[in-house]
Image (cartoon, rainbow, N blue to C red):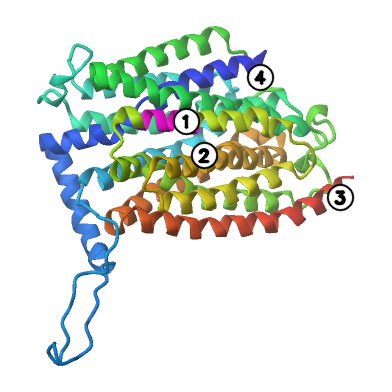
């Protein structure tokens, strides 16, 4: 029953969160068109920082001396590469994405520690209220609910309010983290990955429906309608959490159980066994894999709709359908594949499969100049989305002491947000300087690092299982 309720809470939260995805870059570009003073200052400042990087990355060819050229050689045009434009929305959007993640990085450990002290329900309600406030600021930033699609470009819109909305949203994005903690409360370690599939399914459903709804609302009624939709979903989510969500913490908040009297449900986890001296080191290893993976994944996930628009000329509606396709594939993988996996090594095995799929997907996307190739690369991207993070989260929860589960998962999510903060800034800059082809191929190379780290993790976990036996 609790897992079903969590599915409802997560879907409402993530539907609101994903509705902005197909219109995010158009919104940012709108403030550029308006020449909003704060946007202009931020764009100019960032451009000045990135210009040396862009200049240094430009390659030139010098013709060797010959009878048809001067003895000093003649510089030719830069080596041809994908067309790159100076679209401020790319790097300002990347900065906002990084800011959003940095705020999650700062807030996640605090939310996790609060969940250990006072229980899960109160922090969940506070995060739901914070999201509601964030979407309200977004709506006001676009001119309010009474604005028409044509008036969204009027002086009533405010980039400063939009930035505030992103700040509040990033600081209160704890619903997913707390849902993961609640799943760990109500499932055994053997069923943890299967239970966490609820989180993955909610993500997949939301990414299937949310962007599509956002795109349709934006096309028909303007971006104010998308913000209004997000506000309505957030209000409903606050009511569901307040009226229906029970407390799931199995011990008195802030009280550590005496040695030898731990909850039977968790008595066979790595961390609660006297032989599990390697559990902290294993947990740190899982943290490191998570961060490195998300640097690449989040950075290129952030630019995917921009790539589709630049390469194939996809509209906001088309990008909404693309994100819906990714969500649909991920939902199928979560429900039809991940939940069926068995064995002590299933988390490592599935995570590796997802990383290999991401590597292949990034290579395909780097070369994609038609819709079919774009969809193939996106499907591989979706497989990675459905497997890697949920499996690494399951490993972290299994390796965590039960009395500090909220803090452990808060720190785990904070590490993930560090990756999500670094990734968009890095890969948006690479994309702006050298184009999508280079950015996605470099991402494919980068995925090799977490793959090797996960391969090294496997034997250590197997050895720990032997000690537990």
Residue for point 47% across, 30% down:
325
Q: Earlier in the sequence, mark 2 or mark 1?
A: 1
Disc number lying in front (3 or 1):
1
Picture coordinates of residue 343, whole percent (x, y): 80, 40
Point out which mark residue 325 bears: 1
Residue for point 17% across, 78% down:
75
Picture coordinates of residue 153, whole percent (x, y): 13, 26
Q: Is residue 74 above or below residue 433?
A: below
- Viewed as shown, does residue 410 lie left or right of 197? left
**Is disc 2 in contact with disc 1, using a CB cutoff of under 8 Å?**
yes
- Viewed as shown, does residue 65 lie left or right of 304? left
Disc number lying in front (2 or 3):
2
Point out which mark residue 248 bears: 4
Residue on which the image places disc 3:
467
**Is disc 4 in contact with disc 1, using a CB cutoff of under 8 Å?**
no
Q: Earlier in the sequence, mark 4 or mark 1?
A: 4
Instruction: Between residue 445 and residue 417, name the one nearer to us.
Output: 445
Secondary structure, mark 1, is: helix
Picture coordinates of residue 68, whole percent (x, y): 13, 88
- Magenta-drawn stretch contains 323: yes
Q: Earlier in the sequence, mark 2 or mark 4?
A: 4
Q: Earlier in the sequence, mark 3 or mark 1?
A: 1
Point out which mark residue 34 bears: none
Secondary structure, mark 3, is: helix
- Viewed as shown, does residue 376 lie left or right of 272? left
Magenta-tinted stretch: 319-326
- Magenta-drawn stretch contains 208: no
**Is disc 3 in contact with disc 1, using a CB cutoff of under 8 Å?**
no
Residue on which the image places disc 2:
379
């Amino acid at each position: 029953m609790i897992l079903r309720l969590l599915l409802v809470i997560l879907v409402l939260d993530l539907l609101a969160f994903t509705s902005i995805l197909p219109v995010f870059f158009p919104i940012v570009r709108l403030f550029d068109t308006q020449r909003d003073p704060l946007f202009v200052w931020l764009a100019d400042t960032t451009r000045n920082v990135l210009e040396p990087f862009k200049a240094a990355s430009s390659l030139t060819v010098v013709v060797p001396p010959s009878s048809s050229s001067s003895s000093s050689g003649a510089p030719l045009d830069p080596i041809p590469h994908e067309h790159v434009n100076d679209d401020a929305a790319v790097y300002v959007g990347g900065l906002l994405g990084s800011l959003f993640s940095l705020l999650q990085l700062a807030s996640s450990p605090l939310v996790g520690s609060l969940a250990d002290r006072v229980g899960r329900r109160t922090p969940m309600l506070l995060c739901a209220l914070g999201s509601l406030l964030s979407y309200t600021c977004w709506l006001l930033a676009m001119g309010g609910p009474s604005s028409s699609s044509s008036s969204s470009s009027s002086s009533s819109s405010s980039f400063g309010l939009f930035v505030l909305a992103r700040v509040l949203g990033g600081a209160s994005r704890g619903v997913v983290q707390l849902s993961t903690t609640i799943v760990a409360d109500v499932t055994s370690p053997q069923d943890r990955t299967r239970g966490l599939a609820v989180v993955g399914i909610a993500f997949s459903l939301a990414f299937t429906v949310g962007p599509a709804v956002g795109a349709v609302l934006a096309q028909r009624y303007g971006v104010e309608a998308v913000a209004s939709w997000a506000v309505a979903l957030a209000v409903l989510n606050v009511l569901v959490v307040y009226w229906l969500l029970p407390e799931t913490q199995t011990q008195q908040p802030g009280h550590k159980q005496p040695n030898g009297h731990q909850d039977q449900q968790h008595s066979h986890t790595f961390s609660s066994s006297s032989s599990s001296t390697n559990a902290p080191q294993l947990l740190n290893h899982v943290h490191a894999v998570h961060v490195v993976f998300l640097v690449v994944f989040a950075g290129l996930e952030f630019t995917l709709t921009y790539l589709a628009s630049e390469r194939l000329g996809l509209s906001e509606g088309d990008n909404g359908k693309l994100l819906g396709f990714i969500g649909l594939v991920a939902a199928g993988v979560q429900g039809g594949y991940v939940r069926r996996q068995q064995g002590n090594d299933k988390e490592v095995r599935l995570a590796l499969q997802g990383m290999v799929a991401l590597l292949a997907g990034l290579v395909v996307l780097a070369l994609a100049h038609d819709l079919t190739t774009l969809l193939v690369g996106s499907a591989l991207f979706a497989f990675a989305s459905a497997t890697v993070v949920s499996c690494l989260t399951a490993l972290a929860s299994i390796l965590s002491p039960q009395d500090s589960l909220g803090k452990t998962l808060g720190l785990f999510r904070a590490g993930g947000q560090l990756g999500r903060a670094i990734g968009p800034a890095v890969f948006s800059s690479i994309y702006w300087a050298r184009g999508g082809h280079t950015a996605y191929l470099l991402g494919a190379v980068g995925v090799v690092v977490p793959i090797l780290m996960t391969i090294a993790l496997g034997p250590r976990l197997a050895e720990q299982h032997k000690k537990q036996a």
